[in-house]
Structures are given as C-alpha cells and as structure tokens.
Amino acid sequence: MKRIVCLISGRGSNLESVLRTAAAERWETEVPARVVAVISNRGDAAGLAHAATHGLPATVVEHQRFASREAFDAGLATAIDAHAPDVVVLAGFMRVLGASFVARYTGRLINIHPSLLPAFPGLATHRQALAAGVRVHGATVHFVSNAVDGGAIIAQAAVGVLPDDTEETLAARVLQREHVLLPRCVRWLCEERIGLVDGGVVVRDVAPGELALLG
Ligand code: GRF
C-alpha cells in the first residue's frame, strides 16, 4: 500500500480531486494506495475541511511560527515523516521549499503548477499568460527540484485562451484540467509507471496522449 501525504495552503480543490478520484477508482485495492494525511501551512486553509470530510488526519504547520525557512522545512518534514509517506503531493502548497527538504523527498515529491512550464513560473500565472498574449495556457505536474517550478515535467494539460478571457475565467478552465491531471499523476507515481531517474522522468505504460491533455 503506497502512502500519500498531501500538502495544501488554501482552498484545497486539487486535494479534493485526488480524494474523490481515489475513492471513485478504488485506489485502495486497485493501485494500491491511499491518502493518509493532509498537512497545511495555514490554519485557516479552507481545504482542511476536505480532510475532515474524508476522515483524514490534518496537521497544521504554520510557517509563521518558525524563525527561519530552514526551521519551517524541518518542522514540516517531521510532520510529513510521521505518516511514513511513499509519495508527497504539493496540491496547492504555496511555500518555497529549501534544498535539504527537496533532497529528502526527491523522486517522490510532485507539484501542480497552473501554467505550461517553463512558461510563467511563480505567482499570478493566469495574469502573466494574458499579459503575454499566449493563445494556449494550462497546467503542469512536475517533480520538485531546487529550481522553483523548474523540476522535471511529468504531464501537462492545455486550454485555449479565449479573446474575452479574464484572469478568473481562464483560471477556472485551467483548474478543471488540473483536477484531471493531478490525480492521474499521483496514481502513476504510486503505480511506479512514472519515476525520476538521473533528474529525468521515466515513463512506463502511459500513453503519450495521457501525458499531454489537449483541448
Ligand atoms: C492551483 O491552481 C494549483 O495549481 C496552484 O495553486 C492552486 C491551488 O488551488 N499551485 P487549490 O487549493 O487546489 O484549490
């Protein structure tokens, strides 16, 4: 049984998509894998309610309570390791993690980012996309490395940018695709159909069309 820990900072819709998909696809028997805990760096994260709904333990590790980034990372790692995870998912986790944290979880730590990386790393990605005038935008799931939003890309989902899109309408369409993309990648990682070898993604038994969701 692969043990999954999900990290969130806010709304938690990506967490909910993983939990809903895991239940619908019966991951406990089919993969087998299950989400064992949710950790938030904010006590007021709305997504914590999803953990409660699904009967999962939720821990808050408030970054503000730590004197330094390194101390926060260490506290976070302690909270994560209490659940002995095989896979750690940054499902809308909005803190940059330091090198030793990343090294500790290399190959089992993935993130979802709301752009077609390497375009638009960082924040306000939908605003960046509209300002750049791109016609295609989307989301990326990648292994976490020391480069912020720069780790090896696992899969991407694209949406067209419409002439009258606002940041909100574009974000909403991308988010719908995120909710398909992230659970798939989590499942593949648990099934060892994707992995990280020498800094590159290796893929086994995943159709190319599943790695690139278009339209
Ligand atoms: C998502 O757009 C995700 O890609 C980004 O932060 C947002 C989190 O949304 N990293 P939610 O908390 O999962 O609803």
Image: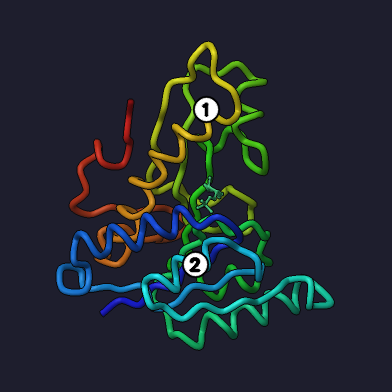
Query: Can residue 30 be seen by looking at this rendering?
Result: yes
Does residue 24 appear to the left or right of 180 in the view shown?
left
Q: Amino acid at mark 1?
A: Thr
Residue 68 place in picture, x, y as percent: 81, 74
Q: Amino acid at mark 2?
A: Ala
Crowd band around label 2 with a 10 angstrom C-alpha radius: few (<14), some (14–19), many (20+): some
- From this view, report whether residue 161 is shown above or below residue 69: above
Q: Nearer the viewer, mark 2 or mark 1?
A: 2
Q: Residue at x 20, y 42 (%)?
A: 207
Which residue has dot 2 on it? 49
Asked which quadrant contains residue 4, the reply is bottom left
Does residue 134 appear to the left or right of 25 in the view shown?
right
Residue 51 place in picture, x, y as percent: 44, 71
Quarter of the image that includes the N terminus: bottom left
Residue 16 place in picture, x, y as percent: 40, 58
Q: Which mark is residue 87?
A: none
